[in-house]
Image: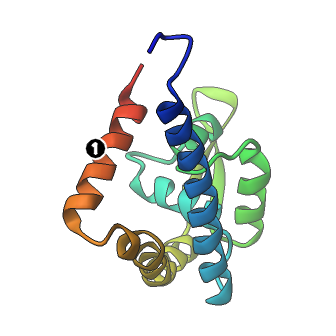
Amino acid sequence: MTENAPSETVVQAWARLVKAQHKVLGAVEADLKRAGFPPLAWYDVLLELRRAPGQGLRHLEIEAELLLAQHNVSRLVDRLEKAGLVGRRPVAEDGRGQLVTITPSGRDLLRRMWPAYRAAIARHVGRKLESEANARSLADLLGRLIDAG
């Protein structure tokens, strides 16, 4: 296999990775919606804000940390702010920059969403992988893709 010509097996792995991501994310999103929760992207942003050291994150920092692709973090943050889940404040040393922070309501939503999200992960990923050994193998393989420069 040359660097410019992947084998059929590598192409198949790629296609299955993309299909699996699409299928599992759709199933998890559907479970959250049925449970009466907002989209997974909301959870993802709130989780990163809760984990953030210091006073919050800038929009670009949020985007860099997201598990899900989010091409318009500003619109998402606008929706979260309108729902009272995040707040914004100016960055002292940068008149144009803003820090986004999680509110107590945002923390509460995270706490309430996690059981439904955890159950969806177990249902749509854990059950299909069947064992901790399989989950570890998949996590290791995907880690190679993530860590590859």
Q: Which residue, given by chain and number where applicable, does mark 1 sit on? A: 140
Give the residue furthest to the left.
133
SS for tag 1? helix
Residue lying at 49% horizontally and 11% vertically, measured from the top left: 3
Give the residue type that dot 1 points to.
Asp
- Residue lying farthest to the bottom in this orientation: 35
Report which quarter residue 40 is drawn in.
bottom right
Query: 110 or 137, which is in the foreground?
Result: 137
Above/below status of 76 relative to 91? below
Q: Residue furthest front?
A: 8
Residue 113 appears in the figure:
yes
**Where residue 141 sits: x, y (%)?**
33, 41
The residue at the point 43 percent across, 83 percent down is 115
Residue at position x 70%, y 29% in the image: 95
Residue drawn at x 57%, y 72% is 28
Rendered-image quadrant of the N terminus: top left
Q: Quadrant of the C terminus?
A: top left
Position of residue 135 measured from the top left corner of the image (x, y, whole percent): 29, 60
Q: Who is closer to the viewer here, 72 or 21?
A: 21
Q: Nearer the viewer, residue 126 or 2?
A: 2
Report x, y in % for residue 88. 66, 52
Across and down, in percent, residue 80 comes to 70, 64
Give neighbour class at mark 1: few <14, some 14-19, many 20+ (Cα, 10 Å).
few
| Snapshot quadrant of residue 128 | bottom left
Identify whether 8 is placed above or below 69: above
